[in-house]
Amino acid sequence: MIIAVDGPVAAGKGTLARRIAERYGLKYLDTGALYRAVGLLVLRRAQDPADEANAIAAALDVDQIDLTDPELRDERTGNAASTVASIQGVRDALLDYQRNVANSRPGAVLDGRDIGTVVCPDAPVKLFVTASAEVRAMRRFEELKAKGVATTFEEVYADLQARDERDSNRASAPLVAAKDAHLLDTTKLDIEAALEKAYEIIDAR
Ligand code: DC
């Protein structure tokens, strides 16, 4: 069983995907962490994330980074991730890793931007998790505040819009809902209500 969970930044897909994996006893892969690992490796090598050859070399070495490293969550790493993610060679280099997890027993929940469209186009369940930009920015702002990061709602909102723009308009695997994806709008749903909807969709399969 493969469950693909895609959507824009801060829509709640990570939390949803992790909880779905727990409930159904499946593996969980946060594919954004892979792009972040490539970004981090490039930064640690003091290279430019926009340099294609170096970024592709880093993608081939992605297993050198521990996917639980807290530095993966830094703003600087997120920006480098977003840059390397637009390079087709980087995306190609990460494809096998993602498909190996997806196809291993007993199955997996993968979250990202292109799981239902590119990585696992035959996944039997695809969820596209979204929410209004205001609500996503507010959630991210609250998260950052709780972590003690000094920022403003306006800053977070502007950054989120820039990320949406980059993720949706890049030439390689842009963020788009697969035609057969179930749309899950979490603007007015808390996590438990969103999970109930997701379980209904999965159980129906
Ligand atoms: O979900 P995230 O913020 O951790 O993702 C980091 C970056 O990686 C983000 O700019 C989008 C990109 N990404 C991608 O292009 N494809 C994926 N399957 C997952 C993430």
Image (cartoon, rainbow, N blue to C red):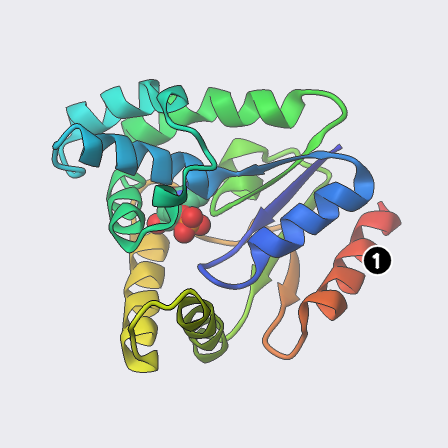
Q: At numbered mark 1, what does the secondary structure look like: helix, strand or loop?
A: helix
Question: Which residue type does callout 1 highlight?
Answer: Glu
- What residue is pinned by disc 1? 200
The x, y position of residue 82, in whole percent, is: 30, 47
Residue 21 in picture, x, y percent from top left:
72, 42
Answer with the quarter of the image where residue 55 lies. top left
Q: Is disc 1 surrounded by few (<14), some (14 to 19) or many (20+) residues within 10 Å? A: few
Q: Residue furthest right?
A: 204
| Towards the viewer: 108 or 40 | 40
**In this rendering, is residue 146 above or below 118?**
below
Q: Residue at x 19, y 36 (%)?
A: 43
Residue at image position (18%, 38%) is 49
Q: Is residue 23 above or below residue 87?
A: below
Residue 145 appears in the picture as rendered: yes
Return the x and y of residue 133 as percentages of the image width and height. 44, 74
Question: Position of 162 compared to 54: left or right?
Answer: right
Residue at the spot 33% in from the left edge and 40% down from the top edge:
172
Work out which quarter of the rendered image holds the N terminus and state it: top right
**Looking at the picture, does residue 18 appear above or below residue 28?**
below
Residue located at (30% from left, 43% from top): 81
> How many marks are shown on the rendered structure?
1
Q: Position of residue 180 (x, y in %)?
A: 65, 49
